[in-house]
Image (cartoon, rainbow, N blue to C red):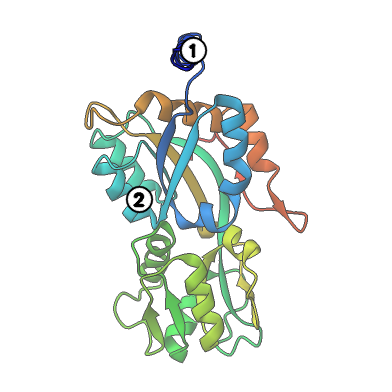
Amino acid sequence: MTLFRCMRATLAAALLAASAGVSWAQTITMASTTSTEQSGLFGHLLPAFKKATGLDVKVVAVGSGQAIDMARRGDADVLFAHDQPAEEKFVADGFAARRYPVMYNDFILIGPKADPAGTRGKDIVEALRKLASANAAFVSRGDKSGTHAAENRYWTQAGITAARGTGYRECGCGMGPALNIAGSVGGYVLADRGTWLNFKNRGDLAILVEGDQRLFNQYGVMAVSAQKHPHVKTADAQKFVDWIISPAGQQVIAGYKIGGEQLFFPNANSAR
């Protein structure tokens, strides 16, 4: 009986603590682009968010197109991507109340240091024309990611839709694997600067094209609407949105650096 009373007292104390506000941490699911994960940003960002709110975040890192599809199905509570036209359609279709700009960096063309196709410079469109003309090895993400969507825009601007050269190949993979393939075949690849700065297996690869205004890379965040999917944790997702666009969250983004170089630049108040 003494043991039973002790166990009962312990259980009562636990229930009293719970009623006083002690609870297990809640977890939200985020569908996000691979660049935010593979750049190391979330490893830097999410502990600060949990410290501020007590919320855990489970990240599913895929291409932006797949992340948006995942959020459309209601398989995520929050969406963090970098394909603005697709994100704006996501909001227009009622899957989120609003899209919030968060941060930006830029795309860069990576290739062999010797640059056999002669792409080096600031014009991404002219560089792609040279790659197609030279039949140079080019590794495309081919995964409907934000990077892949941007690459397709640049090919269109170059007037090249189908014949991208015999060296063009799609890997259907994330940014890190695409960079690895480019390194192994001595090829070219469009990358986001954040993943490149965190990429360790550079070998003979180097930045060849940067500085073109068309290479601007904007990220946005959205809480998935409970009106579309009643089971999603919209209120907790909005806590993440509110924190990441707050001065505190923006400061954490700005503070993420590799080798003294900043990977992402906060711009929550931007209209872009």
* View extreme (right): residue: 260
Disc nearest the viewer among 1 and 2:
1
Look at 60% across and 54% down and name the residue there.
40
Residue 170: quarter of image: bottom left
Which numbered disc, 1 or 2, marks the residue that appears first in the sequence?
1
* Residue 183 percent coordinates (x, y): 56, 82
- Residue type at the position of mark 1: Thr
Q: Is residue 162 rendered to the left or right of residue 61?
A: left
Query: What distance separates the C-alpha of mark 1 from that of mark 2?
Result: 56 Å
Q: Is residue 119 rendered to the left or right of residue 23?
A: right
- Residue type at the position of mark 2: Ala
Q: Which residue is mark 1?
A: 2
* View extreme (front): residue: 1
Look at 55% across and 28% down and name the residue there.
243
| Vertical order, 167 against 21 (above or below) | below
Q: Is residue 174 rendered to the left or right of residue 256?
A: left
Q: Which residue is mark 2?
A: 67
Q: Nearer the viewer, residue 58 or 241?
A: 58
* Residue 242 percent coordinates (x, y): 50, 26
Secondary structure type for disc 2: helix
| Vertical order, 270 against 195 (above or below) | above
* Residue 97 percent coordinates (x, y): 33, 28
